[in-house]
Every structure is written in C-alpha cells, then in structure tokens.
Image (spheres, rainbow, N blue to C red):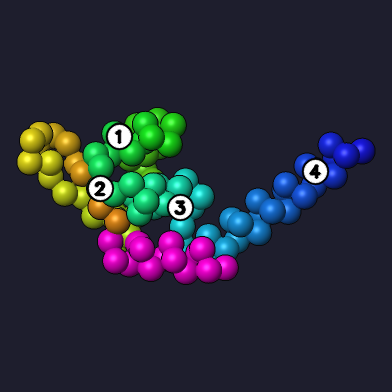
Amino acid sequence: SVGFLVKQISDLFRLRFEAVLRDKGVHPRQYLLLLVLRDEGTMPQQALGARVGMDRTTTMQAVQGLAEAGLVAREDDPADRRVYRLVITRQGRATVDALEAK
C-alpha cells in the first residue's frame, strides 16, 4: 500500500539523517536549535525552547550538550541575571554549514 511505502521511505530518511548528525556528534533536537540560533540570532534559552516547541527540561539538556561541545555559548542577559542568552559559536556555524553541505 502507498501508506506502507511512505512509512518505509520516511524511516529510511530518518535513519540516514540521524547517522549524518551522529557523525558530527549532534542530535536532531540540537541541530534544530543550532539552525534557529544561526538564522534568528542570539536569544534567551526559554525563548529558543518556546520557538521550537520544546519543553524546558528538553531544551536545557539539548543546550547543555551543545555548550559542552562548544557549539553554543551561554551569556548572561544584562537585563536579567537569571536568564541565559544563547549564541551560536563559530564552531557551531561550521557544524551547521558542514551538515547542510551533505
């Protein structure tokens, strides 16, 4: 059936996509966050999560991994010291560029 074949193609595409990301040490959620930061610029962590429809805990975990890998940097928000603003690093931009080239 058409539905079955579409599902098979979808699964193959997802597996290939995840393998390409894994080679760069990035999870699909993290890749999404990197794309938004690259395209929309620096923003508070909570705003980034809300922008992509990710809950606070998942956003925090994804950002933590990106920060540890040097792909994003956390900056204090001068207006509110309780808020982190996230900025994509040069290494983060290079990672996104390399992934988009594949």
Q: Earlier in the sequence, mark 3 or mark 4?
A: 4
Q: Which residue is mark 3?
A: 31
Q: SS class of the residue under badge 3?
A: helix
* Number of the label disc, if any, that sits on residue 42: 2
Is residue 69 in view from this perspective?
A: no
Query: Residue 4: horizontal and vertical position, in percent?
Result: 85, 40
Residue type indicated by callout 4 = Val
Q: Earlier in the sequence, mark 3 or mark 2?
A: 3
Nearest the camera: 6 or 16? 6
Q: Which residue is mark 1?
A: 47
Q: SS class of the residue under badge 1?
A: helix
- The answer to whether residue 94 is magenta is yes
Distance between the alpha carbons at the discs numbered 1 and 4: 34 Å
What is the residue that sits farthest to the right in this orientation?
1
Distance between the alpha carbons at the discs numbered 1 and 3: 16 Å
Q: Which residue is mark 4?
A: 6
| Mark 3 and mark 4 residues within 8 Å of each other at the beta carbon | no
Q: Is residue 60 left or right of residue 74?
A: right
When asked about the image quadrant of residue 44, the answer is: top left
Query: Over which residues does the magenta segment extend?
Result: 89-102
Query: Residue 85: horizontal and vertical position, in percent?
Result: 21, 44
At a point 51% along the width and 63% down the height, the residue shown is: 100
| Mark 1 and mark 4 residues within 8 Å of each other at the beta carbon | no
> Does residue 80 sit above or below 76 in this rendering?
above
Q: SS class of the residue under badge 2?
A: loop
At a point 45% along the width and 52% down the height, the residue shown is: 31
The crowd level at tag 1 (other Cα within 10 Å; few <14, some 14-19, many 20+) is some
Q: Quadrant of the N terminus?
A: top right
Q: Quadrant of the C terminus?
A: bottom right
